[in-house]
Amino acid sequence: MSKKILILGVGAQGSTVAKRMNEEPNVSEIVCADYDQKAVDALVSELDKATGARIDARNKDDIVVAARDADLIVNGLPLAWHGNVLEAALEVGANYQDFAATDALAEDWIDSIRILYDVYGPRFAAIDRTAVVGTGSAPGLICAATRRAVRELDVCDTINNLVFEGVEAKRFLPFWWSPVTALSDMSERAYAVKDGELIRTEPFDLPIKRFYDYMGLDASITLTEHCHDEPVHYWFNRDAYFKGAKNINFKYGGAGADFAKPLYRAGLLSKEPEDVAEGEAIPFDLVLRHVPPAPKYRDEIRTILDEGLVSDTGCMVVEAYGKRKGEDVMVETHVLAPGLAESFDRAGITAEMYLTGQGGALFTKLFVEDRYTQRGLISSDMLTDEQVDCYFEWAAQLGIELKTEIKRV
């Protein structure tokens, strides 16, 4: 059955999903909606199945109007508006997908995730629909890769999700995705699981070093604690999907972290108002004003490449420690994917857009091909083994592949 999809937010993630779905034979119509009419028009001009709409996500009724008759809403908006999108999906009876779990449903982020599972899950199940949250690259692709790695173990003790962003332009461009999201993640205390308990850790703390000899990573890299979804979701689902994992960390490194760390240490990522000469100012907001947005248009990316790159490296790695046939082992899985130059050659987009947008589009393709058997709300770490295998079969066609080695420890 041919599908109608509403894509909310036509930034790096949403626009990439729209382009991918435009190629799907089982998609008949794509509605691209955003507050930025220029961005909507630019995207729609590239697609033959798309129409555009300007919406204000602060108004749920705007979303409802755009979503009429949609089979699926793909939500690429900032986290603050996710509550409105969830409610709109329920009102029109649509399936739902987003790229990260919202923190806007309760004062505490963990409570927000509980509400997603415990409140919205039953509500989507009651209308025979599926909602999948956290479906970019991380969370998303890395969660599916973690499930694949843990499958090799009889018992899992420790999971490390490691991400190193090594793409650096000659121009000042510290982040290849939303600067507000990046700086927020880097200024928040991170979540980790220690001895089965969910704990908080300090940003840029608990460094580890790794050496990988691919994509130009010819030196030791450092990764530190970073606030991200994965440890929280894995903690909620540790018994059902992660073989009882008791220790879970997400660690991050690269040019963006190198930029943010001194700002954090200087207090410049604080969101508390401070007295200044002419009144009050919020340091975080002042920093954000001076950070350029992530590039998303083909001509813009081409210009950056023409200017030259400092580096075009990176890695995404899953380490899963535990028992296999009575032995202590570590299952090490690398996600191999195109860098910036190759991503542009393949699809006219950045490496971040390629991995996050294309990775997200594969979760959308699972909807389009009716591969979801679950009803209610799940996070991307809750796929079935069959769905995980299907996901990576499709990913390989995009040049996104897994390399796994099982090592004795």
Image (tube, rainbow, N blue to C red):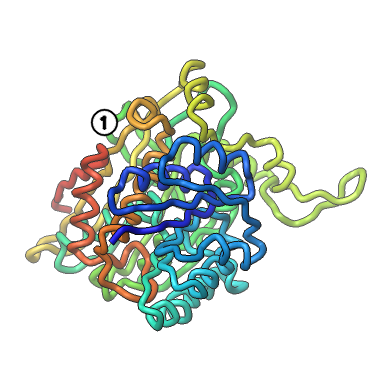
Quarter assignment of residue 80 = bottom right
Q: Which of 41 and 253 is in front in this view?
A: 41
Vertical order, 271 against 94 (above or below): above
Drawn side of residue 156 relative to residue 346, left or right: left
Location of residue 239 in the rendering, given as x and y in whole percent from the top left corner: 28, 75
Residue at 14% from the left image edge and 50% from the top image edge: 406
Drawn side of residue 323 relative to residue 359, left or right: left
Kindly identify which residue carries mark 1: 213
Location of residue 35 in the rendering, given as x and y in whole percent from the top left corner: 63, 50
Q: Which of 33 and 58 is in front in this view?
A: 33
Instruction: Please tell me whether mark 1 sits on a helix, a strand or a loop.
Output: loop
- Amino acid beneath label 1: Asp
Quarter assignment of residue 395 = top left
Q: Residues within 10 Å of mark 1 (few under 14, many from 20)?
A: few
Location of residue 42 in the rendering, given as x and y in whole percent from the top left corner: 54, 36
Residue at 42% from the left image edge and 50% from the top image edge: 251
Residue at 48% from the left image edge and 28% from the top image edge: 298
Location of residue 409 in the rendering, given as x and y in whole percent from the top left corner: 17, 53
Vertical order, 290 against 131 (above or below): above
